[in-house]
Structure formats: C-alpha cells, structure tokens
Image: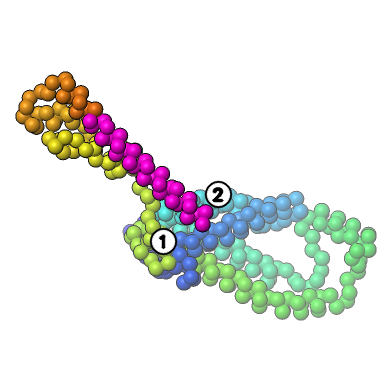
Amino acid sequence: MPTFRGFQPPALVNSFCGLLDIKSGAKIILLFGALNKVAGVYGLISAFTGGSISQMSFYIYSSVTLYVVVWGLRAVADESTHKCLKLAHLYALDHIIQTIYALRFARHQWYEIPHDGARSFNSQAQKDLVDLAISRHEIPAERPSNTAEIAHGLWEQEKGFTAFVLILAWLLKIYFIVVIYSYAAHLRTNTYHSLPLSSSSSKPTARSTTDQWASTAPAVPTKPGYRGSLDDGLSIDEALNTTGSSAGSGRPDKGKRRASAMQVNAQTEDVFKWDSDEEEGDSKQGKRSSDK
C-alpha cells in the first residue's frame, strides 16, 4: 500500500508558465511564499489590537512555517532530489491548511458579518479609539439613516470580485504545487538539465590538488633510457636509477649520476620557465586587449 512518503508523482510541466526555467520558477514560488509568511509575522501585532483566535492562530502558523520556506529555497538551489520532494509534500500540506483558513474566512465574510455598516469592535482598545475619534469630531457620533442600505449595496458589488480572487489564488497555488513536484521529479529522473529552458551546465566536481597536478604537470625530458614524466610519481634520482638499470650498464658512477641529475634539473627548470613566460605573455596580451 503506497504511503504519503513514497508518493512521487511524475513531472507534468517542464517550465514555469512556459517562459522560465522550472528551477527559477520554484524559487519565485517560494519567494512569494516567504513574502506571505513575513506578512503573517507582522500580523502578530493583532494580539495587541484585539484580533480573533483564528487570526492569531493563522499568524502564528505563518511565523513558524517561514523557516520551512527558507529551508526550501536552499534545497531548490542545491538541486537536492530528496529535499525537493519533501518540500513539495510540505508545500501541498501548507495549501491544505491554508484552504481551511480560507474557508473559515469565506464563511465569516459571507454569513457572519451583517454588512449593515454598523461599527464592530474586537476589543475594548478599538472601542476606546472610536470614542476618542468621536470626541474630537473626526467621525460623526450618529450614523446616517441610509447607512445599512449603502453597506448592502457595496457588499453586493464586491462579493463577486472577492470570490473570484479567492478561487484564482486557490487554483494558482495548485499550479505552484505541480511546478514544485515536477521539479523534484526531473531531479529524480536526471532530466532537469536536458530541458529546453534549463541550464545544461553541471556542478563542477571537486578534485584534489594531487589530481589537478597530475593532469597538468608537464613531461620532464630525460635521457633516452627513461621514458616518463613527473606524473609517474618518480623522483629525479629514481628516474636516473631507472635509466641506468634499463640501459643494462650496471650502477653508474657518482660523476655520471651527478652530471645526469644536473642535466635533468636544468631541463626541468627550462620547462617551468617556458610555462611561466607563456603565462606572463598571455596575461600581457589580455591586458593590452582590455586597454584597447
């Protein structure tokens, strides 16, 4: 029986809105999510202005999940298959939770608020502010007789647009979920870098200093009896010994060994000096090109 953890849907889209790389799209989605969560953090001040319990719980939830969004941005940037799949699961779960809050908001907005223009207070602090404004003659103490009629008319004009915005945001979030799941699926199947809008460049693999030196070390000219280079891992003395043994002439005397070593050292210095001069010439040529 499949579990939620093993739920791995296939890639349904290959780009973001057909215009951007799917990885860039996932980052944009998470940045929008981070902006939404940050707004929830600022909403915590409703605790001091008389916000409802549902508002407070939503703002606390947004503050806690802000960390998940930041973690998800790093997972997307690192192209981690396991983390991106987990991110897609968490993003889908977040959509379910926010859908519950949206339904709670719609129920309150459509069926609980009378829309008659009457002043409503969520706390004594709000009532005190209204009383202060009335005492300063900033707002009238008595409402006009047609306030309820005007309020109902405004609500009739606005409720259709409000419903449209809620449904559009809900469907857009579904598309965002599909994009993140598709990005994780492409990473899992190693098809992300082959997508038309995706970057084909792969991450450089780290190599040790020894490997880099072995692949770039120049060959050292030696006596004809020794065919090798510094890449063989032999020292100059070992190379000379190999030369002497391969020639079948026995162990060379000290004078010949010293002369051969001096010859090899001189040739090696010439090779490195030639490389240094070549690099210096390239740098000077590049500088003259930039000056032009």
| Magenta-colored span | 263-292
The color scheme shown is rainbow
Q: What element carries label 2?
A: helix
- Badge 1 crowding class, 10 Å Cα cut-off, few under 14, some 14 to 19, many 20 or more, is few
Apparent side of residue 71 relative to residue 35 in the rendered image (left or right):
left
Whether 49 is among the magenta residues is no
Q: What's the amino acid at mark 2?
A: Tyr
Residue 154 is at least partly visible in this image: yes
Q: In this view, does 244 lie to the left or right of 80?
A: left
Closer to the camera in the image, 196 or 121: 196
Comparing 78 with 148, the one in front is: 78
Check disc 1 and report its element: helix, strand or loop: loop
**Cα distance between the residues tagged 2 and 1:** 28 Å
Tag count in the figure?
2
Is residue 99 shown left or right of residue 258? right
State the image coordinates of residue 258 (x, y, percent, origin top left). Answer: 20, 23
Magenta-colored segment: predominant secondary structure: helix
User: Relative to residue 130, is residue 153 drawn left or right?
Assistant: left
The crowd level at tag 2 (other Cα within 10 Å; few <14, some 14-19, many 20+) is few
Tell me the residue that label 1 is attached to: 199
Q: Residue at x 33, y 60 (%)?
A: 189
The front one of 76 and 38 is: 76
Question: Is residue 94 among what the camera can see?
Answer: no
Residue 44: percent from the left, percent from the top?
68, 52
Q: Which residue is drawn at 53% across and 62% down?
A: 29
**Quadrant location, the N terminus:** bottom left
For the residue marked with disc 1, what is the amino acid? Ser
Q: Name the residue under label 2.
A: 67
